[in-house]
Amino acid sequence: MEITIICIGLLYFLSHYLTVVYQKTRIPDVLILIIIGILIGPVFHLASVEDLGVLGQLFTSLALIIILFEGGLNMELANIWGSMRTAAKLTVSFFFITAIIAGVLLHFVMHYSWLLSFIAGFIMGGTSSAVVLPMISLLHMNKKPGTILVLESALTDVLCIVFVISFLGSYSTGIVEPGKIIGSLISSLVLASALGVGAGYIWLRLMNWIKTFPNTQFTTFAFMFIVYGLAEYFGFSGAISALAFGIVLGNYSKIPLPMKFKDQLPDGIITELERKLYSEIVFLLKIYFFVYLGMSIPFESSRFFIIAMMLVGVIYIARLLATRLLVREQDITWEDKSIISAMVPKGLAAAVLAGLPLHYGIPEGAEIQIIVYNVVFISILVTSILIPLIRTHFISRFYFMFFKPRVIPIIGKEKGEKPAEEAPSTTDN
């Protein structure tokens, strides 16, 4: 027990040091934390996820909720409206592209049935909010592309959950019900958003009363946990509700509320001190989330690892092409488009859903779980390596040429058009 407590303290200081390492080397702290988890778990067997039991799953859920809430808190309504169309296109299109790619590959390589192969594809169709949001903050992306990635990571969780559970039911009954799937998807998204927005409005109305009590810095978190729990209890997306709740609190001054009501609100619903406190909590939870994720990854078969590598390789190539076709806004730089094309890490949602086929008694369920866990690790590894490489000269030249902006004639400047971006300097490191 004493050693465990010492290690927890050391990890905290190590993570601060890793932030400095990232600024100097561009090696993400996420990658090193996952490797630490792998060393603790699968390699040296110092601890396992079974040792933590239900506490480990509870902890990872709390980390995801708080990361999404803080992400919503820092998003601006103008950027959300401006990014929604592109985010929706990218989210839906690439979710199905991933499912099709993974389904076809698993069908022909592992000889699974088409339905089971696509179920596995749906499990891997999303991106991880817990990976994407911390990396965006480190990269200092422009607000619009950053918002696209945040929205995508939240929306794909819903798509993954609805399609995997619906198709697992179809696997059991032999009947696919498109209407039921679409209805579940719409209700989960719309009702979860409504719950988050409504809860944000209620919390704003309670704020003056709450502020009269001492030690209220964590009351917003406590209310957010209630919102998330209610959403999950009623079968909606808790992640979407937490994100919507954060957006309302972060943008209350721009939301059309009655003027009398706004005047009654205290200055700064979320104070600067509270924002710093929330950021520190996210930092702390992120450390142990990624260590826990590393501990969860099995390395039981080189065959499954190779298949996972093939899946990740094809998915990243498809992502590059999809970004080129779907993200066409002139106000998004080639560098931000490059980061969008490389930001396809899988995470908590995939890891949790990977166990469902086995839970449903499907004979190939154990194999699917191992493959998905390996895809989670490899995708995070590739993202963590590729993002820093995008900013090196050789790789940046490739991405610049691939996402090369349209060259606008000089006369275009008189019409207020945006001039073409410059290629990366030959002095880039």
Image (cartoon, grey):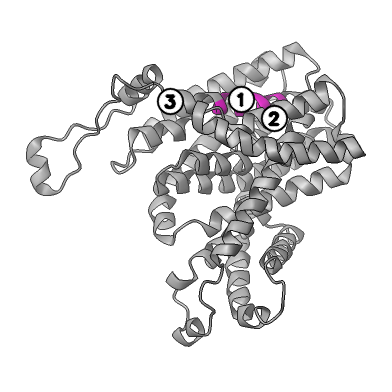
The residue tagged with tag 3: helix, strand or loop?
helix
Looking at the rendering, the stretch of residues picked out in magenta corresponds to 372-384
Quick check: is 221 in the magenta stretch?
no
Quick check: is 378 in the magenta stretch?
yes
Residue 332 position, x and y percent, is 34, 41
Residue to which mark 1 is pinned: 381
Residue 62 position, x and y percent, is 73, 52
Q: Residue at x 63, y 57 (%)?
A: 278
Where 42 falls versus 159 (above or below)?
Answer: above
Where 417 falls versus 255 (above or below)?
Answer: above
Do residues under tags 3 and 1 come within 8 Å of each other at their CB atoms? Answer: no
In which quadrant of the rendered view does residue 60 lie?
Answer: top right
Q: Residue at x 42, y 33 (%)?
A: 323
In which quadrant of the rendered view does residue 308 lie?
Answer: top right
Residue to which mark 3 is pinned: 390
Instruction: Name the quarter where the C terminus is drawn.
Output: top left
Do residues under tags 2 and 1 come within 8 Å of each other at their CB atoms? Answer: yes
Query: Along the line of sight, which residue is nearer the eye, 247 or 286?
Result: 286
Structural distance between the alpha carbons of marks 2 and 1: 9 Å
